Amino acid sequence: MTVTVETGLWQLDPTASTVAVRHKTFWGLVAVKGTFAGVTGRGEVTADGTATGTVTIDAASLDTGNKKRDEHLRSADFFDAGNHPEITFAVRSARHTGDEVQVDGQLTVRGVSRPQKATAKLVSADADGLTLEAEFQVVREEFGITFNQMRMMGGPTTVTATLRFTRTAA
């Protein structure tokens, strides 16, 4: 099924969107999961069908269900939210083909920017709104997050996102 995405400006609906992380700890035996409560974003779809935009995450809004762990994740050992309050994903180009969207972007964490590619699934789209789901891997050491007490936190972090955008203008 091919879905058409309307051109124009789009605004992220934070009440219908989620960005979560999952990282295996304790030598891969346990996964720590968390969700960011503060997510905003915007985008533009042009007449040729390509899109650009930005998703911004409040680094201090991560909730793993453990207050002490959340405070540690906000510290300089991890996100350093006091000095780097935002995590951003700037979409440089997104091309919609079928129900997939190939995304080329720039992920910035702790003030360090790296290219990031992702394949998103276009879950729904109509004239007023669209929903994307994406999952990709991040190597945290590439962003200066090197804390690894007793070597318990090896491997990549998985980021999953469900992003609902509403159309604001043609």
Image: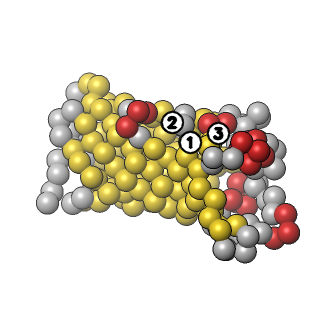
Which comes before the other along the chain, label 2 or label 3? 2
N-term-proximal mark, 1 vs 3? 1
- Which element is circle 2 on? strand
Identify the amino acid type marked 3. Ala
Residue at mark 1? 36
Label 1, residues with CA under 10 Å away: few <14, some 14-19, many ≥20: some
Which of discs 1 and 2 lies nearer the camera? The answer is 1
**Disc 1, disc 2: CB below 8 Å?**
yes
> Considering only vertical position in the picture, is 32 above or below 44?
below
Q: Quadrant of residue 31?
A: bottom right
Spatial CA distance of label 1 from label 2 is: 7 Å
At label 1, which amino acid type do we have? Phe
Q: Secondary structure at mark 1?
A: strand
Per the image, the residue denoted by label 3 is 59
Q: Where, quadrant-wise, is the C terminus in this rendering?
A: top left
Residue at (48%, 55%) from the top-left corner? 160
Q: Residues within 10 Å of mark 2 (few under 14, many from 20)?
A: many
Front-most of residues 31 and 119: 31
Residue 89: tell me if it is visible: yes
Counting labels gives: 3
Q: Is residue 52 among what the camera can see?
A: no
> Residue 3, percent across and down?
17, 51
- Contact between labelled residues 3 and 1, with CB atoms less than 8 Å apart: yes
Cα distance, mark 1 to mark 3? 7 Å
Q: Which residue is mark 2?
A: 39
Residue 45, image quadrant: top left
